[in-house]
Image (tube, rainbow, N blue to C red):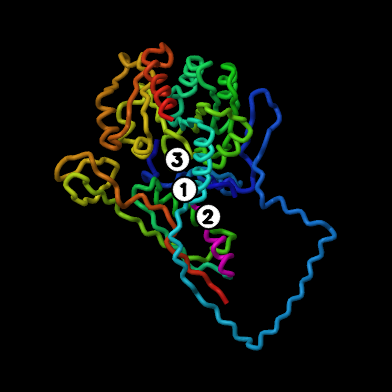
Amino acid sequence: MPDKQKPYSVPKNYLFLQDNKKNMHELSIAMQIIEIVKEEAKNHAAIGISAINLDIGKLSGIEPDALEFAMEEAVKGSMAEKAEVHYNYIQAVSVCEDCCLEFEVQDYFKTCPFCNSLNTSLIKGKELKIAAIDLITN
Amino acid sequence: MCGTCGCGEDDHITYRKPGDHSILHTHNHDHNDHTHAPSHLHEHSHDHSHVSSHEHEHTHTINLERNILSKNELMAERNRGFFEGMKIIALNLVSSPGSGKTSLLEKTITKIKGKFETAVIEGDQQTLNDANRIEKTGVPVIQINTGNGCHLDALMVNKAMKQLEIKQGSVLFIENVGNLVCPSLFDLGETKRVVIISVTEGDDKPAKYPTMFETADLCVINKTDLAPYVDFDEEKLKATARNINPNLEFISLSAKTEEGIDLWIQWLYDLKSAD
């Protein structure tokens, strides 16, 4: 089979939006983002949304390509259609509860690189939030 | 739009009990329920008395710091409160498709029948097959068909359990959509999350799907009767999974031969008596 797709790229059959069928959790997340910013815009009597700043931890379970693609689709026809979306991907950091070392992690493996303890906790990298939005008002 | 699944207005999620050919309940979104009585007169008196014709647009930055899954989390906490108040143990069973969740449930229900009240919520993209299998064991069951959805969310569980009439003190099994990725992100309000893996899937599953193993409380290793025929290193699986989640417990069993199933039943008893 020809291997034209990059790993993690959005598959070709990802066309469900056209017939209004939704799957994949990144799209659920994108729809939820739009829902929240619309609500906020309404509460502030805004006439438009010019920017959305997202904080996404690298271990939040979100695939960046899929989320960015889903966001492009999710904003269509909404107040946020022209908004600039900024993605702040946050490097995951753990702290060792035994030797207090703070270290960057790329995955879920928990071993402390200094003392090999498993007693470590993730302190950054699980974020999945809307940090700020720019609203246009009269 | 419902909870977090983004299923919008197309109402493709269905909730059915075995034997029902009609769809019991589709998504009724409250915001669709606006009915305006004909006598309701809206007086629109737009009185534009602005002196200045120069209206400047301003941009304000609102620091939201809001969790994107906050709606799901709020609903999950409501479910959790309901479970606590009703002394219900709710177990979210997650796994890949075909790991033997339904078979294990069938066996479990037969074993604990008469000891605790049991109820089941089945999640699948399509069909009533699993609910029909569970119904034969005689416990209340409801099937959620998520259509294209890849996971159950807290709102779906909330709607399903309202129809299920769960008795006080029950053990509620929520069989999630067979998927080791997305369900890990969605808290349903469960008491414990149980990840089920079968020996035929390979011992590198925790390394491949760490999020699921990181959020689980118990890992059930199923189909141990097939272990001699496949390359499956149980100790390697446990070591990898513990590296991701040191608090994860393990039970090895075969739902088919019932070998080791007593450990699982004992785990349920312990959970129930600790409640």
The structure residue drawn at horizontal position 32% and vertical position 14%, both measured from the top left corner, is B229
Q: Position of residue B212 (x, y in %)?
A: 38, 37
The residue closer to the viewer here, B271 or A66, is B271
Look at discs 3 and 2 and give the one toward the viewer: 3
Q: Position of residue B3 (x, y in %)?
A: 55, 47
Residue placed under numbered mark 3 in the picture: B182
Q: Secondary structure at mark 1?
A: helix
Q: For mark 3, does the 10 Å Cα neighbourhood hold few (<14), some (14 to 19), or many (20 or more) residues?
A: many
| Image-based side of B267 in relation to B81, left or right | left
Q: Quadrant of residue B208?
A: top left
The structure residue drawn at horizontal position 39% and vertical position 39%, both measured from the top left corner, is A2
Q: Which residues are magenta?
A: A30-45
C-alpha gap between disc 1 and disc 2: 11 Å
- Name the magenta segment's main secondary structure: helix
On screen, residue B263 above or below B29: above
- Residue type (three-letter) at the residue carrying disc 3: Cys
Q: In which quadrant will I find the C terminus of chain B?
A: top left
Q: Secondary structure at mark 2?
A: helix
Residue placed under numbered mark 2 in the picture: A73
Residue placed under numbered mark 1 in the picture: A26
